[in-house]
Image: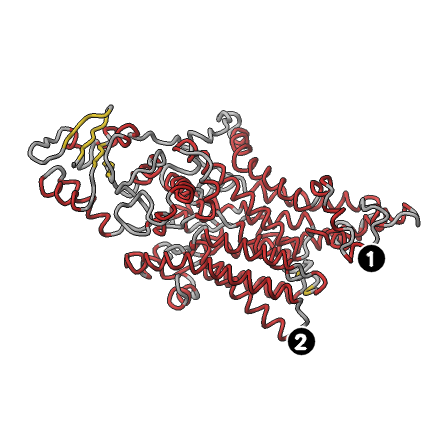
Amino acid sequence: MYGPNRLTHEARDPDMSDAVTQAADRSGPSRSAGAVLGVPAEVTAEKVASGETAGRVRRSPGRALRHEATLASAAGLLLAVAMIWLVPPFAIWIMSAGETRPAIPDPVHTITGDISDPTAQAWILAWNGHAVLHDIGHLWRTNAFYPEKYPLAFSDSLLGYAPAGMIGSGMADAVLRYNVMLVLTFALASVGGYALARQLGANRVGAAIAGAAFAYAPWRYGHDGHLNILSTGGIALALAMLARGHGWSLTRGYRPEKVRPGWAIAGWAVAAWQVSLGFGIGLPFVYIVMLTCLAGAVGWLVSGRPPLPRRVVLADLGGGLAFTGACGYFAYHYLRVRALYPETERPWDYVAWFSPTLRGLFTAPRSSLSWGAWHESARNAFQVASNEKVLLCGYVLYGLAALGLVVSAWTIRQRVFLTAGLVVGVLLALGANGPLYQLLYHYLPGFDGSRTPGRLIVWPTLLLGLLAAGAVTELARRVRRAALAAYARTLVLAVTVPLLALVLAEGLPKMDHPEVPDGPWAAMAATPTPMIVLPSDEGIDLNVMLWSTDGFPAMVNGGSSITPSGHQVIRDLVKRFPSPDSVNRLRLLGIRGVVVDRKRVAGTPYERLLDAPTAGTGVTRRNVGADVVFALG
């Protein structure tokens, strides 16, 4: 599919084989199939096999631009921009019969999803880049959640996106960065799904359907505020690279001559990068990689231990150690959080509260353009956390995958394995409402810290895409064989491309783009640190974290899926501020400033601070703009 062996692969590809043969026949004996494909006549098969021409071929910029990997990546990026940012406003306008005026969202002043979790994740991206450049020793401590330890591990760290966080500074750049990275996660997911299906043996349209299904499944829009959950592209891409590095596919099995150690190393590197984004999606991936390695070892033994090139063994040893080291580095910090904060463990009853039912497989989130409004009553029946319980992968995808059970490029045995994996994945995604998840919860380390089993739908989505890709590949082959040679390619595209269009149409989102709330920046800049901005709770603090990207002052504020007991103690303490005992305890904790945000304090226990006396407490008070700043001295 990629790399120097692309010509050999394409000559055997269902999309290319007939066309190449016919072109070679028409060109006569003086022109080879290689010349038809654009390879110079002097580049013989022997020279290609020996690597004698590799340097010359690889130096051609035109060839690099025409490479399938380049074209697929560019198409994935353009498709993501269109699907997530450009097309939905006009699709909504058409569906509303012109009542809704189309407007492209402002990527600097609006944020995709809502103004809660996305603002916190925008802060995480900014903090990682800032810390790596300027304060790496306090990477895990962060400027928020003072004085807690390892607060970066209170949620998925997204550390793999740190290079993006190094670009720009301040809140406007943080918002723009978040919106850009959100689009890129969809692009990488589609390219990763495409690469995996192609490596396993699907044709181009079939692989494109697998990639589109993996990236734009309707359930994903229930997590439009969770960049960490949408970041699944590295999963499929790593598996594709590892399969290519080991010369393995579904259609051809293991071929020693196709082993590429460089691709294996790249696969391990991408796998480690995927884990660096967090364990919300990364933890199951780690176990899948371990299971895949075990299955590969068993398969190697059962098949008579075919020879393995020394270079790929070394690549696996080095890459596997690097992957293990990355997993260990992140596991250490999350285990430290588990030890320091027992509240991170999720009781089984809490997991059951977030567990979906089978009905969730046919229910779409509110942000699905195709089905969101239609499924409102079904979502309401879930009562709480409905975004974690809607698991619709796409009705078109379901139909294509069902077709793939009976008509497929994959063998019957391979279809059985894919189906078995699909069934197991669905049962696990049901959490407490299924028979299997409890085994993970009790016996596999890490799962007792997860409250959302429905996120395991990532794996059934990938398997459904592969089943669909097998069906479309075989369908294309049958159409080609039945059609006249002159019209075969046109008929194949006429039959298969509309299926891709249907998958994409069903995957269009209707996500919100609210304006980012203003913050008391002048007051925060004028307040001694560490500080606390009031009011403070799990919702408001998500915004305060984003505001702090202007300078990253040390502050108590911080919101995540867990609330450390000490953190809540400070919130309760400042409700009595500026009483002498509260002032003394805040000073002992090292807190030196309190900011009262006048626009948000109305109706909260902190409203009285707007006029609270400070005589005799040693606290100085001053107005900074509309807001109030207290300095504890």
Can you tell which mark lies on residue 599? none
The mark that comes first in sequence, 1 or 2, is 1
Residue 500: x %, y % from top left: 63, 44
Q: Which element carries disc 2, helix, strand or loop?
A: loop
Left or right placement of residue 218 versus residue 519 in this view: right
Q: Is residue 231 visible?
A: yes
Q: Is residue 616 above or below residue 435?
A: above
C-alpha span from label 1 to label 2? 30 Å
- Colouring chosen for the image of the structure: secondary structure
Q: Which residue is mark 2?
A: 304
| Residue carrying label 1 | 46
Nearer to us in this view, 464 or 4: 4
Instruction: Find residue 599 and report its horizontal and vertical position in percent.
Output: 25, 28
| Residue furthest right in the image | 29
Amino acid type shown at disc 2: Gly
SS for tag 1? helix
Question: Residue 238 is drawn in which quadrant?
Answer: bottom right
Q: Hey, what amino acid is under mark 1?
A: Glu
At x 23%, y 52%, the residue is 565
